[in-house]
Image (cartoon, grey):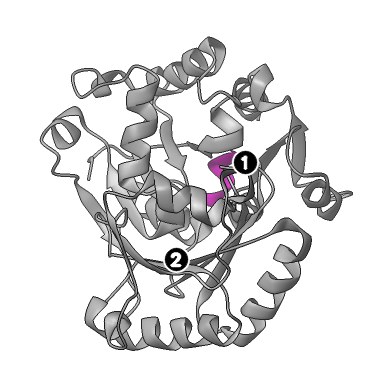
Amino acid sequence: MKNQNYKKMFITDLDGTLFTDNKQISQLDFDSLEMLGKMGIVRVFATGRSLYSFQKAFEQIGFDKNSYDKLPVDYLVFSTGAGIMELTREDIINLEPKIIKKHSLTTDDVIHIADYFNSLKLDYMIHRPVPDSHYFIYKEHNRKEGKSLKSDFNLRVEIYQDFIKKIDYAGSVRDFGEATELLSIVPAQYGHKTADMIEQALSKFSVVRATSPLDGSSVWIEVFNKMVSKSQAISWLAGELGVKQQDVGAVGNDYNDLDMLKWASHSFIVKNAPKSLKEKLTGNKQFQEVKANNKSGVADAINIFLKH
């Protein structure tokens, strides 16, 4: 890790926060993050995306392997905290990510969670340990036929069709071994109720929910090692870099950001966050609402953070 002792840290989520709805970064947000770097403030991207998905997202907005050094970021927390990476140009170009911390589920954990998901007849995916978590096997109980009827689960299977395999024999899950996570995708109308039930039943694990970045409504329910969350990753990283909790700012937009926002001393939620999430924060002086992701909400949060 870098030897510099930072005095402050600023973290931003990606989808729905730093990324606009069309998966771009506004120039104002980009410039504001660059400014933080010049001020010696450590910058962190904290995302639910896998490392592969992170790389693809930035390639799509023009940052190929020859220009990653221009990204205004120092560290990446990915897969909701299952992995932490120090971002340097050389690491990404050589496709040898400098993973400085990671967590996985054991084989027995994976079997236990999969058995529970099967008992509920949930569709789910089992992802390989980081940094290869874009490879997964999957089980589908609720297949929908026809293009117009495709579920969010089906869409994700299509996106990753080159990296996936169906669970097609009795020992598939055991033979798969350790995993980053098990992910179930549940329709919006009963997604949060299902997540509440899973949290209670699988309390020895970290259960994280998020709004789908694909259809914008389905609920993704992810089950990780108990040590995995954005807040735990950020807390560890701040400690390693010598940053005090009181000097940490964070901005996000969804349920999987909530624990991170509660941990940071200066917390911001973009205006486009789900109404039900903002209602949970009503009256909490720790949180401040900033402009929407399409209106450079990250830059707005940075300006307020710097005033403190």
Which residue is labeled 2 in the image? 228
Give residue 184's position: percent from left, percent from top.
54, 66
* Residue at far front of view: 146
Amino acid of disc 2: Val
Give residue 20's position: percent from left, percent from top.
58, 24
Q: Residues within 10 Å of mark 1 (few under 14, many from 20)?
A: many
Which residue is labeled 1 in the image? 252
**Image quadrant where one finds the N terminus:** top left
Instruction: Judge whether residue 216 is colored magenta.
Output: no
* Residue at far right of view: 283
For the record, the magenta segment spans 244-252
Q: Residue at x 56, y 42 (%)?
A: 214
Q: Give the distance between the C-alpha atoms of the residues marked 2 and 1, in whole angstroms.
A: 17 Å
Q: Residues within 10 Å of mark 2 (few under 14, many from 20)?
A: many
Q: Residue at x 19, y 35 (%)?
A: 92
- Judging depth in this view, the residue of 133 and 273 nearest the camera is 133
Disc 1 element: strand
Amino acid of disc 1: Gly
Classify residue 165 as left or right of residue 199.
Answer: left
Q: Residue at x 58, y 83 (%)?
A: 203
